[in-house]
Image (spheres, grey):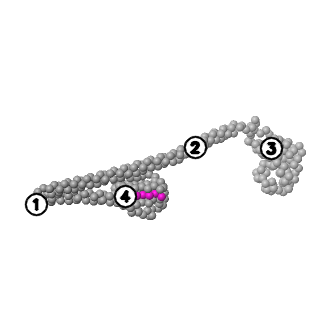
């Protein structure tokens, strides 16, 4: 490995022909032709400083011999000197020979390559981590999407069970109310029969007794008053029963479903009378304390009557949740 020497070397070896150096030969020929250094630089498309270095035989030692030979050949051709003559003079001066070029170490290249490899490893590691996180996120979302229909089905089943229990409860209450009404009517009829029978027996006995004008009139008056009192009680009970039936009819809420619809119905006390998904073709009858608070998931698929009077739902937008209070 040779060392670099940045000092300029002056060509001082004379040629065998005329004792002139190659640069001096070119300068002398240029002057004979009446050309300036500027003219030569324009022809060769080189800087004037390069022309000056050629004519003064000054070159940096790090310049390659091939470029030096090319400069001299171009200059010789421009001024009409034989290329062989100039190259021969250049060889004798020692500047036309190739010199051993210094060898460069590849350690720096290895360091750069190692640095690039390290960066690539970090980049791949980050990509793997990002892919792993994305995979976990996708899997969690997939699990949630899978569990959501199951939860909805379970909720629908629970709602259906609650609705059936509500229906059974209403049927039981209606039956017990009917039984109580029948018992009340039977008790009233029995009481009326007993009183009437007693009055008939008492009248028969009274007719068999000796005539007692004043006492008989008093007894007849008392019996008549008692009979009138019993009849009045029976009439009041019948009126109360009719009034209760009328009030119940006025509070009855009936719903019929043409399409599947989620509903929730509450009475004035906040008690939930019915909630859940209702199927198309189902009907529902509810009794509670008015006013009713009603939520309909699909109002276009439901018809409602309150106290046998239809409720207008046309003002509610189809496909949007409707909230209403009746009456």
Q: Which residue is mark 3?
A: 65
Q: Which residue is mark 4?
A: 252
Mark-to-mark CA distance, 2 and 3:
64 Å
**Residue under the image location 82 percent in, 48 percent down:** 70
- What segment is highlighted magenta in the picture? 251-258
Q: Residue 304: x and y, percent? A: 42, 60
Mark 4 or mark 1: which is in front? 1
Mark 4 or 1, nearer chain start = 1
**Residue under the image location 77 percent in, 39 percent down:** 101
Asked which secondary structure carries label 2, the reply is helix
Q: Nearer the viewer, residue 272 or 305?
A: 305
Q: Which residue is mark 2?
A: 135
Mark-to-mark CA distance, 4 and 2:
56 Å
**Residue under the image location 43 percent in, 48 percent down:** 161
Mark 1 or 2, nearer chain start = 2
Is 255 in the magenta? yes
Mark-to-mark CA distance, 4 and 1:
59 Å
Mark 4 or 2, nearer chain start = 2
Q: Which residue is mark 1?
A: 213
Instruction: Give neighbour class at mark 2: few <14, some 14-19, many 20+ (Cα, 10 Å).
Output: few
- Which mark, by number, is residue 61? none
* Residue 279 in view (yes/no): yes
Instruction: Give neighbour class at mark 1: few <14, some 14-19, many 20+ (Cα, 10 Å).
Output: few
Is the magenta region chiefly helix, strand or loop?
strand
């Amino acid at each position: 490995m040779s060392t670099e020497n940045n000092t300029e070397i002056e060509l001082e070896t004379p040629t065998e022909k005329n004792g002139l150096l190659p640069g001096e030969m070119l300068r002398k020929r240029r002057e004979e032709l009446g050309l300036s250094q500027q003219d030569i630089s324009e022809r060769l498309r080189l800087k004037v400083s390069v022309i000056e270095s050629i004519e003064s035989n000054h070159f940096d030692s790090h310049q390659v011999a091939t470029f030096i030979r090319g400069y001299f050949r171009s200059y010789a051709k421009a001024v009409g000197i034989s290329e062989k003559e100039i190259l021969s003079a250049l060889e004798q001066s020692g500047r036309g020979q190739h010199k051993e070029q210094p060898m460069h170490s590849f350690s720096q290249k290895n360091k750069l390559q190692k640095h690039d490899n390290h960066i690539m490893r970090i980049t791949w590691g980050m990509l793997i981590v990002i892919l792993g996180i994305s995979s976990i996120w996708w899997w969690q979302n997939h699990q949630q999407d899978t569990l959501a229909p199951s939860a909805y089905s379970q909720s629908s089943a629970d709602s259906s069970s609650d609705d059936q229990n509500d229906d059974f409860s209403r049927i039981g209450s209606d039956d017990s109310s009917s039984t109580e009404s029948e018992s009340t009517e039977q008790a009233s009829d029995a009481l009326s029969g007993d009183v009437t029978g007693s009055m008939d027996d008492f009248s028969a006995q009274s007719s068999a007794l000796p005539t007692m004008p004043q006492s008989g009139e008093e007894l007849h008056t008392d019996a008549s008053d008692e009979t009138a009192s019993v009849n009045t009680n029976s009439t009041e009970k019948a009126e109360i029963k009719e009034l209760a039936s009328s009030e119940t009819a006025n509070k009855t809420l009936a719903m019929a479903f043409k399409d599947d619809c989620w509903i929730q119905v509450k009475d004035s006390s906040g008690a939930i009378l019915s909630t859940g998904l209702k199927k198309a073709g189902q009907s529902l009858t509810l009794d509670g304390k008015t006013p009713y608070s009603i939520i309909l998931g699909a109002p276009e698929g439901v018809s409602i009557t309150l106290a046998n009077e239809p409720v207008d739902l046309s003002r509610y937008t189809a496909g949007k949740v409707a909230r209403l209070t009746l009456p």
